[in-house]
Amino acid sequence: MGSWLTVSIRVAYNARRITRLQSARQHGARQHSALAQPQACRIARTSDPYVLLAPHLEQMRTSLLTLLGSSHPSLNAIAQYYFLHPSKQLRPLLVLLFARATNGLGADFPQVNWAADNARAHQQELDAPLTRKDILCDWNPSMPDHTASFQTAFELHIPPPNSSSYIPPPPPPPPLPHSQVLTHTLLPTQLRLAQIVEMIHVASLLHDDVLDKSSLRRGAPSAPAAFGNKLAVLGGDFLLGRASAALSRLGSHEVVELIASVIANLVEGEILQMKGSGTETPPSPSSAIDLNDLHSSPSSDKWSIYLKKTYLKTASLMAKGARAAVVLGGCREGEVWKEVAYAYGRNLGIAFQLIDDTLDFSSSTAQLGKPGFADLRLGLATGPALYAAEEFPELEAMIERRFSRDGDVETALTLISSSRGVERTRELARLHAEKAREVLALLPRSEARDALEGLTEGVVKRRW
Ligand code: FPP
Ligand code: MG
């Protein structure tokens, strides 16, 4: 099962992605038509997540560009840059698969579904601002003169009573009988959430490529290489701004809280990583000893710091993004569905990053448009190095000085390659992926659940 997924995911990297997806869709159609045959169960288990959601992913990616428009051409270019290069879209995929695997199960699903239909009927799209446009875009020359002009001090304007663009939500619908039957419906809020998580991910990559001084991403010049560091940082900030506005329009305080906490987690994860990389300002002699420094901690602490960092920088967005999708589907506190989403996303995210850390040592990495051994060169000790240090204690000193002496990177590489570090890191990733798969047993059987199962295997077997 993993091989088709690896192939499908690689497809997303191919320049001829659309053509390939179309043929994958035809392949998917063949599988689905076979569903009518008696061996339905066997066939259903081969649901390819990318095929299952191909139309949504494609539509989501193109409509996302309209969320990013601004009146500054260079800001447009940088904000859209990474969206124009095909990506795995793993985070949106996770959000949409969990939406499909759980919609209909939450006690409030009839209400949220009714509200979505009602919003459509009243043209109340998620694009409708909550604030009057002349306030929201008050710098924009096409706005009414009283807010667009900065020539004089601003006078108080009391708007006429019904000039607000905000239409108050309709009264809640009468409670409907709830049958907990799965539905394939994806709510507009969940599709928008998928875009928001991708925007946040891309914002973090724009910042990350500045911090890591990366010259390449997905085989093309990185945003800092193409536009410079300043625009890359500002482009990331702009994406966060647009993502925040879109988030507020989803109408769920719980989801706003979850996703806002992910942005903080990403930064916390990056800081935790920087503490070990030597790229931060060295502490002054008088500063307190930092107990969270991975590189100077005892080895058991090194592992817990490394895994915590892995959660913060990678798994948090997957765990909380999946949970948020289920919340938008009307899952109440105390219902198991959002706990399943969180546990799955958290374990899958850690598995994903552990594999990423092993790929840094793979000879094929350079072919994928990434410089090899980037982590070691940045002074970072990831899973393979931490495991290798158990076999070759001389690595400890190198880890502590962040591979900073001449010849450290080369010696460390030789030792890590002679150790079981990469293999053991893959085993640890497999363990997390298996845990992710196990929790899915709590969900009813569906194509989306099968696709989520397949994803656990695909993440561990990936070579990208
Ligand atoms: C890629 O990791 C980077 C991340 C997963 C997160 C980076 C987070 C920040 C820079 C904090 C700022 C966040 C926001 C939202 C502005 P990697 O360097 O291991 O992977 P790579 O090889 O793809 O670069
Ligand atoms: Mg990086």
Image: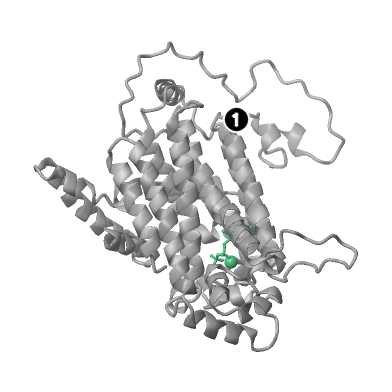
Q: Quadrant of ligand 1?
A: bottom right
Image height of 297 relative to 418, above or below: above
User: Along the line of sight, which residue is nearer the eye, 217 or 285?
Assistant: 285
Question: In this rendering, does residue 233 appear at all?
Answer: yes
Amino acid type, label 1: His
Decide if residue 158 is on the left or right side of residue 411: right
Outermost residue, bottom direction? 407
| Rendered location of residue 196, percent (x, y) | 53, 45
| Rendered location of residue 350, percent (x, y) | 50, 56
Image height of 133 relative to 277, above or below: above
Dot 1: element: helix
Residue where numbered disc 1 is placed: 253
User: Along the line of sight, which residue is nearer the eye, 251 or 301?
Assistant: 301
Rendered residue at 45%/76% (across/down): 362
User: Along the line of sight, which residue is nearer the eye, 129 or 250?
Assistant: 250
| Rendered location of residue 405, percent (x, y) | 70, 85
Q: Name the quarter where the N terminus is drawn.
A: bottom left
| Coloring scheme used | one colour
Image height of 161 relative to 143, above or below: above
Image height of 226 relative to 149, above or below: below
Give neighbour class at mark 1: few <14, some 14-19, many 20+ (Cα, 10 Å).
few
Rendered residue at 64%/23% (across/down): 164
Q: Name the quarter where the C terminus is drawn.
A: bottom left
Mark 1 CB lies closer than 8 A to ligand 1: no
Rendered residue at 33%/40% (across/down): 441
User: Along the line of sight, which residue is nearer the eye, 193 or 364?
Assistant: 364
Write down the quadrant of residue 383 in the picture.
Answer: bottom right
Rendered residue at 18%/48% (across/down): 43
Outermost residue, top direction? 174
